[in-house]
Image (spheres, rainbow, N blue to C red):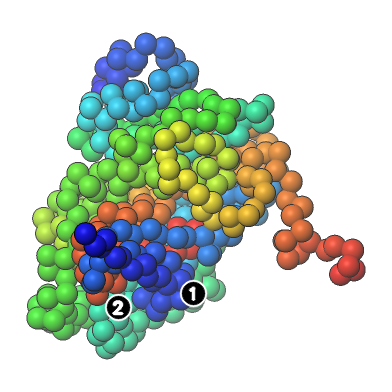
Amino acid sequence: MEIKEFINTLDDCKLEGDKIVISGGLHRAIESAKSMSFDMLKSITAVDLSNGEVELIYLLYSVENDENLFISIKTNSEAETVTDIFPSAVADENEIYDMFGIHFLNNDKLKRLYMPESWDGYPLRKDYVSDDTRLAWNDNEENS
Amino acid sequence: MTMKKTLKLNLGPQHPSTHGVLRLILELDGEKIVSCEPDVGYLHRGMEKMAENMTYIQYLPTADRIDYLAGCFYSELLCRTVEKAKGVELSQRVKTIRVILLELNRIASHLLWIGAFLMDLGAVSPFFYAMREREMILRYFEKLTGQRMMYNYFVFGGVRKDIDYIEDIENIIKILPEKIKDYEKIITDNPIFLKRTKGKGILEQDVAFNYAVTGVNLRASGIEYDIRTTDYLYEGFKFKPVVLEGKDSWARYKARILELKESIKIIEQGLNILTYGEKLEQNLINPINLKLPEGEYYNEIEAPRGLASVYIKSTGDDKPYRLKWRTGSYYSVNLLRKLLVGEYLNDAIAISGSLDIILPEVDK
């Protein structure tokens, strides 16, 4: 029920299965979801769609109504940050930055998380080639 | 005017009480913590990238290794996703076996936490007591599955083999309540323990929501959110989610003790359902050339360290196009940014310990 009410507050969106696909206005959408009792951002999932776009799926949860809400947005390299609404997004956005190279605007806490600071490339991108010479199992000519 | 000088202190990654390799960069004003910046990634194994290059059955043993203390939960998640995608129903016996093993695993995980938490606070003997009881469960798992920690026992559509050595489980759930009473005698009202945990690390409800804290930590702040109540595996099992109002480290300890008792109740009910002679009926899915229909799949489970979930996007191939794990500890680590500020350095260990953070789950 809450989800239907929530869709009415958005200008431009369509429903694809369980998820609400929006084309912009992410920050506003998340903000209005929070005001409609979706008070937890369970996770942010990023999916590389192999056409240069990355899909971000925001999963919100309402404890009151025991309901999940999926909001999806496609982006090229930048997205709005939602850390000011949900501080838990600091963790998710950092991971997505590290693994997909998406820059979240106005999030000044972004840094490489799992990978070293000097690492080139973003491992979970589909076009990432794991031929970094620093990988221990990479035989280079000197060793062979 | 003199500037206030602060001191930067590295806690970890080799600190004995960080339960793995967690590095906290603390900014101190005297002994008070001004800010905390967790640094993770020392155990990163690329679990999500690995999934994209492996078939589902190849990846199944890997799922156990996300959280080595509660491996069952993650293999259950992966199995569940494949079963739901394929439309396979589980028989009651398979469901019951899974519930019993999940709950045994949960008890083992909580027991280790109790021991390790008390050791963080400087009490060494409860660690040995807790490990002694945990050993019974691990011995049982070893007898049944051949493995002490990474069981690889759940398979797509059922379990690897029928449950056995039921008398061992009966023995465990007979002994455990007595032992829990002993723990409570030693720990719960111990004045030193109370001083270090009562009123320390208070997690308010709005903070818990904002930082996406789930599991026992959330329930110890007075919010009833336990996915087991709506989980299809647990249908027909009677239990009450443990909800406490304390919000502090002590409440999180107490909640885990009470949760042990609930788990024992669930196992008892499970054993009642398992009639000894009944044959095991399984709808095993052939793992060779297993392809999930195109689409997105999302499943959740109540793991010992909070909500665990898996998201799989399939393009109809025999490998997942994208697989994403959500683990409870990852958000507990992020919570430290908030929870440690304003506390004293010597409470930092007690507070971060009370959240039950396990690092392989954080780093994936």
Amino acid residing under circle 2 = Asp
Q: Which amino acid type corresponds to the residue marked 1 in the rendered image?
A: Arg
* Horizontal relation, residue B167 to residue B61: left or right: left
Task: Indicate whether B136 appears above or below B334.
Answer: below
Which image quarter is the N terminus of chain A in? top left
Residue drawn at 43 percent across, 30 percent down: A80
**Chain of the residue under label 2:** B
Report the side of B119 relative to A129 (left or right). left
Q: CA distance from mark 1 to mark 2?
A: 25 Å
Determine which quarter of the picture holds residue B329: bottom left
Question: At 67% across and 26% down in the image, what residue appears?
Answer: A51
Where B114 sits versus B283, above or below?
below
Rendering coords of residue B232 (x, y %)? 35, 44
Q: Is residue B209 placed above or below B136 in the rendered structure?
A: above
Asked if residue A110 shows in the view, the reply is yes
Say if residue B165 shows up in the picture: no
Q: Nearer the viewer, residue B354 or B279?
A: B354
Whether the residues at callouts 1 and 2 have beta carbons within 8 Å, the answer is no
* Residue B120, disc: 2
Front residue of B301/B339: it is B339
Residue placed furthest toward the front: B1
Residue A135 - label: none
Q: Earlier in the sequence, mark 1 or mark 2?
A: 2
Q: Nearer the viewer, residue B337 or B44?
A: B337
Provide the residue designation for mark 1: B148
Chain ID at mark 1: B
> Residue B113: x and y, percent?
32, 71
The quarter of the displayed image where residue B264 is located: bottom left
